[in-house]
Amino acid sequence: MAGSSPRRSEALALCFLVFLLVLPGVSGCGGTLTAPSGGPVTSPNYPANYGNSLNCEWLITVPAGSTIRLTFDSFDVEQDYDFLRIYDGDSASAAVLQELTGPQSVSPIVSTSNVMLLRFTSDNSEARQGFNFSYTSNNTYGMKK
Ligand SMILES: *[C@@H]1O[C@H](CO)[C@@H](O)[C@H](O)[C@H]1NC(C)=O
Ligand SMILES: *[C@@H]1O[C@H](CO)[C@@H](O)[C@H](O)[C@H]1NC(C)=O
């Protein structure tokens, strides 16, 4: 029956769309961090300017019972258009610990649990140097000397 053909192209179109949506995350932007401490982690191209229309997510998970402390060496993104949002949990529906924009000196940010999500978004024009951060957890047990 010819009736299956439109459905197949529909499925192909859907696959293509999913591919386009997933692609930015695959191109080396963001990541999953699971060591008790880590970094420096930088925005794409750092210390050169990051790109436009980015959506990068870093998910940090440290051993249960520990908290995460983020420290920024530098921070500069386009004021009011590009943002780094830091969530107190594993998704963007968790409480926002900080919403950072513009050039600033960022004080250490501490989570309440062992999971933290960082989401960096840039709009379609203008870019800055971005940021460079590291993190530590208070889990001395898992830390190497
Ligand atoms: C880490 O700090 C939090 C908050 O102060 C505390 O509740 C937790 O017990 C600490 N965990 C460890 C492994 O020291
Ligand atoms: C991030 O900052 C640290 C401390 O200032 C520096 O040593 C490191 O080179 C920076 N990372 C990059 C990729 O520039």
Image (cartoon, rainbow, N blue to C red):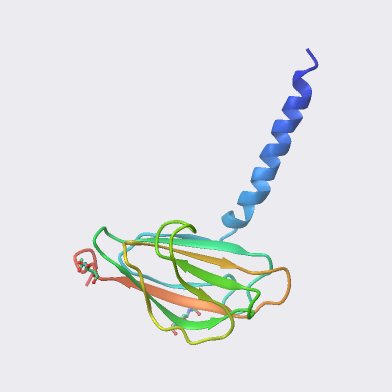
- x%, y% of residue 31? 48, 60
Q: Quadrant of the N terminus?
A: top right
Asked whether residue 29 appears in the rendered view, the answer is: no
Q: Residue at x 71, y 77 (%)?
A: 126
Residue found 68% across the figure and 65% down from its top: 53
Quadrant occupied by the C terminus: bottom left
Placement of 48 over or under 29, stated as above or below: below
- State the residue in front, 104 or 73: 104
In-front residue for pair 129/118: 118
Q: Position of residue 127 (x, y in %)?
A: 67, 77
Relative to 107, 21 lies left or right: right
Q: Quadrant of residue 124?
A: bottom right
Where residue 50 sits in the image (x, y, percent)?
63, 73
Viewer-side residue, 10 vs 91: 91
Closest to the observer, 61 or 96: 96
Looking at this view, name the residue that lies furthest to the left: 141
**Picture quadrant where residue 34 is located:** bottom left
